[in-house]
Amino acid sequence: MASPAASEVYIIDASDRDHAIEALWREVGFPSLDGKDIAVKANFNSDDPFPATTHPDTLGAIFGQLLDAGARTIRLGERSGMGETRAVLRNRGAVDVAARAGADVVALDDLPREGWEAVPGDGLHWREGFLIARLFWDADVVVQTCCLKTHRFGGHVSLSLKNPVGAVAEKNPGGGYNYMMELHASPHQRRMIAEVNRFFPCALSVVDAAEGFSTGGPERGHRIAPGVILASTDRVALDAAAVALLRLYGSTPDVMRGRIFAMDQIARAAELGVGVRSAQDLRLVALDAESKETAFDMRRILDGAG
């Protein structure tokens, strides 16, 4: 996979999520989805409210855009690492939002072995490889939405490159190898996170940064309120922009120090061709007057320490 020459990250005021998602969708130029089967990966890792998990209004706005674009089916797939998935999805409102949109909800924990695709460990930092839900491989289009968070359990940040880890099996069905235990114990955790993205197709990623955690995370931390939503077709560019946003508000030493494109998740994903390789290949596009100053400050950080 060749790195794209340049990628755009769009930024917009988050005060009206329906308007923001519609404007981002239009600006990205998403094609018609007539008759296509769509898989959605949101961020429901724990039974905690936004910004720990996807805001119901953001999820509903994304479902609305998918339906307006002609999607035949929509399936929301999730595995909660810090809770029972079905309970989390119910308590956080995802089940009700999906029902209103006519979307199916799939708790990935319940999938049989044939619901997973085996990714071999060749050339990766995963000793045994890993299993990724076929739901995302079989879909015509995959869209994801995540939150703006740091990650105190070794990931450093939990953004669009981290979110697909929820599409990986915790363990081999039937009580087999525990992939998440390996991930969280490995000194290569952040590179392993990046490697999942090579096998997770994704047409569009959205970071809801109306609020976020600048320390702690993923389920609790110091709250900040940037008041924007970011979107891109390039997860590397999107995460680099999101890290710049965290730096703007002040974050953990792991997030604040060094060059953004030298961070393990971003560097490894770029190396694998998931997205752009440098801050110079990333263009920030503010879609309204309210987000222009934030975009300017993010660009300054990217130019100085990208």
Image (cartoon, rainbow, N blue to C red):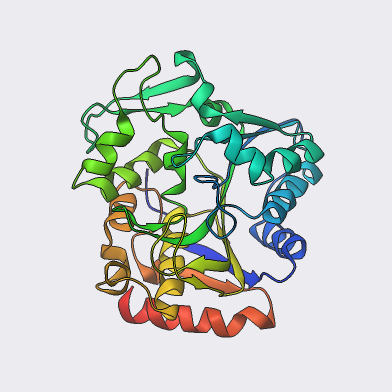
Q: Quadrant of residue 216?
A: bottom left
Along the line of sight, which residue is nearer the eye, 78 or 301?
Answer: 78
Along the line of sight, which residue is nearer the eye, 88 or 304?
Answer: 88
Along the line of sight, which residue is nearer the eye, 39 or 59?
Answer: 59
Residue 128, compared with residue 287, is above or below; it is: above
Q: Is residue 33 visible?
A: no
Q: Quadrant of residue 82?
A: top left
Q: Is residue 11 left or right of residue 160?
A: right
Image x and y of residue 155, in percent: 32, 53
Residue 270, compared with residue 184, is above or below; it is: below
Q: Is residue 199 left or right of residue 112?
A: left
Residue 26, compared with residue 67, is above or below; it is: below
Q: Quadrant of the C terminus?
A: bottom left
**Which residue is at the far left?**
187
Residue depicted at x 34% and y 45%: 193
Image x and y of residue 111, in percent: 51, 20
Q: Is residue 272 visible?
A: yes
Q: Is residue 6 left or right of residue 142?
A: left
Q: Is residue 293 left or right of residue 62?
A: left
Image x and y of residue 146, in percent: 54, 53
Image x and y of residue 120, in percent: 29, 25
Q: Quadrant of the N terminus?
A: top left
Residue depicted at x 31% and y 18%: 176
Residue depicted at x 43% and y 55%: 218
Count the marks. Answer: 0
Along the line of sight, which residue is nearer the eye, 265 or 26?
Answer: 265
Residue depicted at x 28% and y 39%: 183
